[in-house]
Image (spheres, helix red, strand yellow):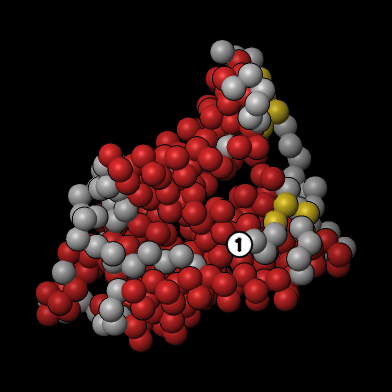
Amino acid sequence: MDIFLQQLINGLVLGSVYALVALGYTMVYGILELINFAHGEVTMMGAMVALAVIGALVASGVALPGVLIVLFGLMVAVLVCAALGFTIERVAYRPLRHAPRLAPLITAIGVSIVLQNTAMIIWGRQYITFPPLLEIERYSIGGATISNLQIFIVLLSASMMVALVLLINRTRMGRAMRATAQNKSVAGLMGVNINSVISMTFILGSILAAVAGVMVSAYYGLAHYYMGFMLGLKAFTAAVLGGIGNIPGAMLGGLLLGVIESLGAGYIGPLTGGFMGSHYQDVFAFFVLILVLVLRPSGLLGERVSDRA
């Protein structure tokens, strides 16, 4: 029971991060019918930029509390990733908006590789450690342990998801995004600025990705130029699990995938008699992806997958 509760807590923390990244995939897909494979690398850039800023502040000896230094790094990462998301859409995807669907898909993979190599050139191949600026406190719940950082990650993720839902359902921009997702041509005729809506979608997704990237680097204490690849694939799996193009589906898919992966990592050793260890946890994400695509291609809450590339 202790193992189950501990893995459930770990899964919810992991799932919160997956959900934030999955929202970027699902928003872009919902409006452009494009799988933005570069989104995972935007997450990586958020982590790397934040660590670069944090490292510079620490090296300068500035007399600020550790939390403020991390917060400042997060803010810079958010701004950089928002600009990056806007630029990617404007330079790489907008010229291909009316091209065959395969063209922007290949371009997305190309952008992903470009971002990886750019990060490798700037920060090198080595892992970058997260400075020990945050005081970690641990609490015991029913035999399991949860830290203040894990609680913060879950609460911040939940707050950002609620804010996104409110923005989409209660604001003028949100109505424009929903109208564009339904029919871009009709929305344009009704006065919606399609280009602005699409740009805002990329910016919002990139902001969520930046926060997720900083969360991951703070949680694991590491960042690397290749970290966005696997994180992006898992978040994409989460979006497919929930129903890509569906906002609540991305949230549900992220949380479910995190819990499945964490429970799998916790029990795979005992179930296989020690033949397989927790380092096989990535297998569960792709097993779930295959299972969903075979049994329910539209995802748990999705409806419109079959006619899209």
- Label 1's element? helix
Report which quarter residue 202 is drawn in.
bottom left
Work out whether residue 296 or residue 252 is closer to the camera in this orientation and state it: 296
* Residue drawn 57% across the image and 20% down it: 271
Work out whether residue 164 or residue 281 is closer to the camera in this orientation and state it: 281
Q: Position of residue 56 (x, y in %)?
A: 80, 67
* Residue drawn 20% across the image and 49% down it: 303
Residue 114 shown left or right of residue 184 in the figure: right
Check the image and report above or below for 221 versus 39. Answer: above
Q: Position of residue 288 (x, y in %)?
A: 42, 40
Q: Residue furthest front?
A: 275
| Residue 248, visible in the rendered structure | no
Q: Amino acid at mark 1?
A: Met
Q: Position of residue 179 (x, y in %)?
A: 19, 66
Quadrant of image for the N terminus = top right
Few, some or many residues within 10 Å of mark 1 (<14, 14–19, 20+): many
Q: Position of residue 290 (x, y in %)?
A: 39, 44
* Residue drawn 55% across the image and 32% down it: 262
Q: How many marks?
A: 1
| Residue 59, visible in the rendered structure | yes
Residue wearing tag 1: 44
Quadrant of image for the C terminus = bottom left
Work out whether residue 183 or residue 241 is closer to the camera in this orientation and state it: 241
* Residue drawn 72% across the image and 32% down it: 137
Check the image and report above or below for 205 versus 238. Answer: below
Residue 146 shown left or right of residue 157 in the figure: right
Check the image and report above or below for 253 versus 146. Answer: below
